[in-house]
C-alpha cells in the first residue's frame, strides 16, 4: 500500500494568535451580516479590537499579501464582485480561495461566504409572467458572465467552472500567488486542491489513486484533511482484500454511499472491514438502512461487533440481530443490553426469528444472564427474550431473578413465578403496574422464604395460591397488609391434611381481598373442620367460580353477613354463595342492595334481647314461609300452650339465635329463587327448570348473550309448548336452505351402546331441552352456569344445525358429551369431547358414533386439513362460542 504522509501539527508552524485572526475573518465571511460588517465603514471597529491583541512580530511571519490587513482581503472580494474580465482578478480569486479553505483539521465544512440569491420577479398585472394569455413577458435578470463570488460560495459551481477553464492560459496559483504545478491533462477540483495545503506541511503529497478520486474525492471536497486521509486509508484496506469480485464491487458501492451519507463517520467503515468478507456488505447495508450511516465509537466498539459476529454462524440471523441492535442504539439502548438479548435468543434454540425479535424501548444496565438462563431451564420453557425484555421494562426484575432460588423449585413452580411477573409487567394497565410492581417486590421475599420450605406438589399448590392472589389484586397500597394475613393461611392450606391439588380458584383471593382487615386476621382461626368443608366446596371448577362471584357480591355489601356465615353456618353459606354467584354482576349487586333493606338483614339482632329476637324470628319465618328455627317447646310457650321457666326460655332462645345465621342464608336463597322465577313461575310446575333459570340469571343484556331467546323458550315452557323453538321460522328456513339434511333423522339422531372399561355406556342425541342446557354444567366447561361462554349453551339448544350427544352410564348419569353441528357445506362438524380427561376408549366410542351418524345422514365428516375451512352459523341464537373442530391426538 502506498505510504501516506503524517499530518503535521499546524500550531507548530503558525502562532495560535495568528490563527485566531484568520478564524475571525473566516467566521465573518461565513455569515451575511459579517460580510455586511466587513464592507461597511466600521470595518476597523470589527477587526481592530482583535488585531490590537496580536503580536506584530507574529504577524510578520505570515504572507503579507494575505494578512497584512483585513482591507486587502475585502478589496480582493470587492474586485471579484465587479469583475468583467478574468485575468485581471485571477490572483485575487486564488487569494480568496485559499483564505476560505478551513485551517482546522477537525472542520467539517469549507468556510466560504454566502451570496445573496436574486429573487424571482413577482407576477403583477403589468408584468404577469406567471399568467397565460399574455404576449408581454418581462425580461429575465441578466446573468453575470463572471459570477466569481457565487462560484466560490458553492464547491459544485466552482468545480463546474474549473471543468471548462483553460488552465494553460491562466494556471492555478498557490496561496503566495505562485503557479501551482499540476500533472499533464489534470483538471483540478475543489476537493483535490485541499491537498495542496499539505505541500507546506510535508515533503510530498499523498498518492490519490484514480479510483479513489472517482468514488470518494467529490464527497470529501468539504472535509478536513484528517477525514480525507482516513477515507484514503479505508479505500486502501478495501483494495488490499481478496475475495469475490462481485462482492468487492458491491462493497465499494456501499462504502461510497456511506461516505456520501456521512463522511465524518469513518468509524462505521473501519468496523465493517473487521468482519469476515461475506459479512462486510451485510453490515454496511444494515447500517445505512437502520441508522443512516450514523455509528459512533461510544455506541459500538470493535470488540462488541466481533462478539456479535461470533454469536451466530448464520448470515441471515446475523443481519436480523444487527438490525435490531442498530434500531435499539437509535433509541438510546446500549450495545451490551442488545448483545445480551442476542445471546439469550441463540440459547433459546428458537429456529424462527422475526425481524423485530430483539427490538426494545428500554435497557437494563446489568442483565443477570446466568440467573435468567437458570430460571428458563428450571421452568422448561423458552422465556429467554420475555425475561430479557422485562429486565428493561420494570426496574427490579433483575434483582428478583437473582434473589430467587430457582434450583429449589419444581418445574411447575418456576413457570408459575415467571407467569406472575408477566401478568404484572405486561397485562396490568400502566397506572396499576407502576404502583403494583414496587409493592410486589416488597412482599416477594416473605413469600419466597415460605416457598422454599415446601417441596413437590405442596410447593406447587402454594405457588398457585400466590399466583391467584397477585393476579387479581388491584389495591397495591393494601398488598403488604393482605400478604401478612394471606401467607400463613396459604402455607397452612398447602400442607397436610389438605389436598395437594385443589387450589380454590378465585375463592380464597376473594375472601382475602373483600373481607375487612379485622375479619381477615382471623381466617386461620376458623379451624381444620371449616377449611376441610371449604376445600370440599371448591372441588369442581364450576363451583369455585360461582363461590368466588358470590363472595364478592355478599362481602361488597354485607361483610358481616359473610363473616357470620363463615363462623357459624359454613355448609349453608357455600350453598347460598353458589346460588348468589349465578346472578349476573350488576343484577347481583342490585339484588343484594334490595335484600339489605329487608327485616332479615336490616335488623340489628345483637341489640335485641334474646326473647324479643326469638319472637321476631318466629314472625319473619311465618311471613317468609320458612321452617322456624325455634325449638318446639319455645314456640308453644310463645303461643300460650305451655309455660316455661325463665331459665328454659333463655336456653331455648340461645339455641334459636345460634341458628339465626343459617336461617338468614335460607331466607336469602329463597329471595334469590323468587327473583329468578318471578317472570315465569316455573319452579313449582317444572322441577327441571331450576338450572335454566340460573343460566338465564347469569346472562347480561347484550343481544349476543341469547338472553332473549332463552326467555322466549321459558315462556313457551310455561305455556306448555317447550319444543316451539324447533319449528321457529328461522330454523325452518335453515332446513329449506339445506335440503340434503333429513330433518327427522337429524333431530332424532342415533342411539348406540358401547362397552367402556367393562361398563355399558349409552350414546344418543339429547331430546330434553332442559338437559341440553346442562351440557356445560355436566362436564364443568365454560358453557356452565356462571361460565364465560354460558350464552353458547343457549345456542346449542335453539339452533337447528346443532345437537348435543350425551354418554350416560348405567345409572343414567352423564359422564361425557360432544357438540356436533352441520356446517354451510353440509358436512358433519364435530367439536371436542368433554371432559378432556375422559379415557381413550370413550373418545374412540364418540369417534365411531360420529362416523355412523354421518353415514346415517348421508353427509361427509369435516376434516381439519390444510386449506380447509368451515362455517357453522347461528340460526335462531344471536351468539355462539365456536370451540373449533375436534383434533384427535
Image (cartoon, helix red, strand yellow):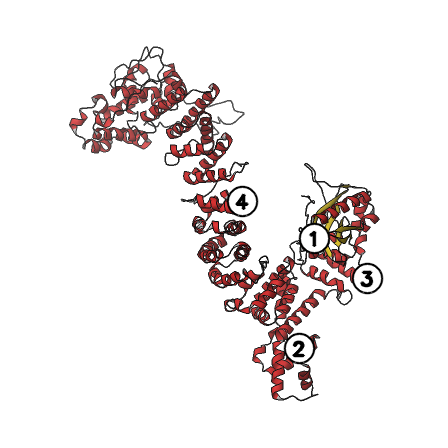
Residue 797 in percent (x, y) is at 75, 54
Whether residue 770 is visible, yes or no, is yes
Answer with mark 4 or mark 1, whichever residue precedes in sequence: 4
Q: Which residue is mark 1?
A: 792
Q: Which residue is mark 4?
A: 381
Q: Secondary structure at mark 1?
A: helix
Residue 676 in percent (x, y) is at 70, 64
Q: Which residue is mark 2?
A: 629
Answer with mark 3 or mark 4, whichever residue precedes in sequence: 4
Q: Quadrant of the N terminus?
A: top left
Q: Which residue is mark 3?
A: 720
**Measured along the vertical axis of the image, is residue 146 above or below residue 793?**
above
User: Residue visible at 34% across and 24% down?
Assistant: 228
To which quarter of the image does residue 695 belong? bottom right
Front one among 889 and 736: 889
Tell me how far mark 2 sits from mark 4, CA to CA: 58 Å
Amino acid at each position: 500500500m502506498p505510504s501516506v504522509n503524517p499530518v503535521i501539527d499546524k500550531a507548530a508552524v503558525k502562532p495560535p494568535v495568528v490563527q485566531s485572526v484568520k478564524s475571525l475573518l473566516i467566521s465573518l465571511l461565513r455569515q451575511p451580516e459579517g460580510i455586511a460588517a466587513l464592507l461597511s465603514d466600521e470595518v476597523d471597529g470589527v477587526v481592530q479590537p482583535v488585531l490590537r491583541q496580536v503580536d506584530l512580530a507574529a504577524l510578520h511571519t505570515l504572507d503579507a499579501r494575505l494578512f497584512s490587513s483585513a482591507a486587502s482581503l475585502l478589496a480582493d472580494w470587492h474586485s471579484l464582485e465587479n469583475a468583467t474580465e478574468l485575468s485581471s482578478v485571477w490572483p485575487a480569486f486564488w487569494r480568496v480561495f485559499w483564505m476560505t479553505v478551513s485551517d482546522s483539521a477537525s472542520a467539517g465544512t469549507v468556510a466560504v461566504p454566502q451570496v445573496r440569491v436574486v429573487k424571482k420577479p413577482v407576477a403583477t398585472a403589468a408584468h404577469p409572467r406567471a399568467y397565460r394569455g399574455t404576449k408581454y413577458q418581462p425580461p429575465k435578470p441578466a446573468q453575470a458572465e463572471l459570477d466569481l463570488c457565487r462560484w466560490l460560495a458553492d464547491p459544485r459551481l466552482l468545480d463546474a467552472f474549473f471543468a471548462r477553464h483553460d488552465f494553460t492560459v491562466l494556471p492555478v496559483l498557490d496561496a503566495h500567488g505562485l503557479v501551482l504545478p499540476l500533472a499533464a491533462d489534470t483538471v483540478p477540483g475543489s476537493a483535490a486542491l485541499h491537498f495542496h495545503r499539505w505541500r507546506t506541511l510535508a515533503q510530498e503529497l499523498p498518492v490519490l489513486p484514480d479510483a479513489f478520486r472517482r468514488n470518494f474525492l467529490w464527497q470529501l471536497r468539504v472535509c478536513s484533511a484528517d477525514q480525507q486521509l482516513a477515507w484514503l486509508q479505508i479505500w486502501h484496506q478495501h483494495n488490499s482484500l481478496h475475495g469475490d469480485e462481485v462482492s468487492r464491487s458491491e462493497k465499494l458501492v456501499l462504502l461510497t454511499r456511506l461516505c456520501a451519507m456521512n463522511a465524518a463517520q469513518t468509524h462505521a467503515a473501519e468496523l465493517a472491514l473487521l468482519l469476515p468478507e461475506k459479512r462486510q456488505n451485510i453490515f454496511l447495508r444494515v447500517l445505512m438502512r437502520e441508522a443512516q450511516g450514523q455509528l459512533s465509537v461510544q455506541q459500538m466498539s470493535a470488540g462488541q461487533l466481533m462478539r456479535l459476529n461470533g454469536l451466530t454462524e448464520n448470515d441471515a440471523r446475523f443481519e436480523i440481530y444487527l438490525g435490531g441492535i442498530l434500531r435499539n442504539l437509535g433509541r438510546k439502548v446500549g450495545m451490551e443490553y442488545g448483545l445480551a438479548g442476542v445471546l439469550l435468543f441463540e440459547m433459546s434454540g428458537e429456529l424462527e426469528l422475526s425481524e423485530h425479535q430483539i427490538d426494545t424501548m428500554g435497557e437494563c444496565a446489568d442483565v443477570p444472564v446466568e440467573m435468567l438462563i437458570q430460571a428458563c431451564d428450571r421452568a422448561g420453557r423458552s422465556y429467554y427474550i420475555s425475561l430479557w425484555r422485562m429486565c428493561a421494562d420494570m426496574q427490579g426484575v433483575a434483582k428478583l431473578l437473582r434473589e430467587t432460588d430457582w434450583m429449589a423449585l419444581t418445574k411447575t413452580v418456576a413457570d408459575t413465578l415467571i407467569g406472575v411477573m408477566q401478568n404484572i409487567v405486561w397485562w396490568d394497565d400502566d397506572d396499576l403496574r407502576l404502583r403494583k410492581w414496587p409493592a410486589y417486590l416488597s412482599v416477594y421475599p416473605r413469600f419466597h422464604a415460605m416457598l422454599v420450605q415446601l417441596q413437590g406438589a405442596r410447593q406447587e399448590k402454594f405457588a398457585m395460591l400466590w399466583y391467584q392472589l397477585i393476579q387479581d389484586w388491584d389495591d397495591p397500597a393494601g398488598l403488604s397488609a393482605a400478604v401478612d394475613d394471606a401467607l400463613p393461611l396459604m402455607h397452612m392450606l398447602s400442607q397436610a391434611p389438605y389436598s395437594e391439588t385443589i387450589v380454590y380458584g378465585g375463592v380464597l383471593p376473594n375472601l382475602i381481598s373483600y373481607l375487612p382487615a379485622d375479619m381477615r386476621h382471623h381466617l386461620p382461626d376458623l379451624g381444620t373442620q371449616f377449611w376441610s368443608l371449604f376445600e370440599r366446596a371448591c372441588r369442581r371448577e364450576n363451583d369455585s367460580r360461582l363461590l368466588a362471584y358470590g363472595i364478592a357480591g355478599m362481602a361488597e355489601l354485607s361483610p358481616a353477613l359473610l363473616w357470620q356465615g363463615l363462623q357459624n353456618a359454613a355448609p349453608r353459606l357455600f350453598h347460598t354463595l353458589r346460588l348468589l354467584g349465578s346472578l349476573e354482576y350488576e343484577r347481583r349487586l342490585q339484588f343484594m342492595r334490595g335484600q339489605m333493606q329487608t327485616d332479615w338483614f336490616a335488623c340489628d339482632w345483637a341489640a335485641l334481647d334474646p326473647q324479643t329476637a326469638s319472637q321476631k324470628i318466629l314472625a319473619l319465618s311465618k311471613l317468609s314461609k320458612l321452617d322456624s328455627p325455634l325449638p318446639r317447646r319455645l314456640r308453644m310457650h310463645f303461643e300460650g300452650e305451655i309455660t316455661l321457666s325463665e331459665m328454659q326460655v333463655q336456653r331455648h332462645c340461645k339455641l334459636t339465635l345460634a341458628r339465626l345465621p343459617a336461617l338468614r342464608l335460607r331466607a336469602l336463597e329463597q329471595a334469590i329463587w323468587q327473583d329468578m322465577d318471578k317472570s315465569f313461575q316455573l319452579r313449582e310446575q317444572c322441577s327441571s327448570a331450576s338450572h335454566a333459570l340460573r343460566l338465564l340469571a347469569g346472562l347480561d343484556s347484550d343481544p349476543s348473550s341469547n338472553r332473549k331467546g332463552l326467555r322466549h323458550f321459558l315462556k313457551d315452557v310455561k305455556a306448555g309448548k317447550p319444543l316451539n323453538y324447533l319449528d321457529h321460522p328461522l330454523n325452518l328456513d335453515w332446513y329449506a336452505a339445506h335440503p340434503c339434511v333429513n330433518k327427522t333423522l337429524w333431530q332424532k339422531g342415533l342411539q348406540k351402546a358401547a362397552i367402556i372399561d367393562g361398563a355399558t355406556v349409552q350414546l344418543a342425541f339429547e331430546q330434553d331441552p332442559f338437559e341440553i342446557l346442562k351440557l356445560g354444567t355436566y362436564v364443568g366447561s365454560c358453557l356452565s352456569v356462571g361460565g364465560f361462554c354460558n350464552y353458547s349453551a343457549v345456542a346449542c339448544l335453539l339452533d337447528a344445525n346443532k345437537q348435543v350427544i350425551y354418554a350416560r352410564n348405567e345409572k343414567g348419569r352423564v359422564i361425557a358429551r360432544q357438540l356436533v353441528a352441520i356446517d354451510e357445506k353440509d358436512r358433519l362438524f364435530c367439536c371436542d369431547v368433554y371432559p378432556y380427561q375422559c379415557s381413550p376408549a370413550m373418545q374412540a366410542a364418540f369417534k365411531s358414533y360420529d362416523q355412523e351418524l354421518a353415514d346415517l345422514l348421508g353427509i361427509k365428516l369435516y376434516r381439519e386439513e390444510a386449506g380447509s375451512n368451515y362455517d357453522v352459523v347461528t340460526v335462531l341464537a344471536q351468539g355462539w362460542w365456536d370451540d373449533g373442530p375436534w383434533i384427535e391426538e
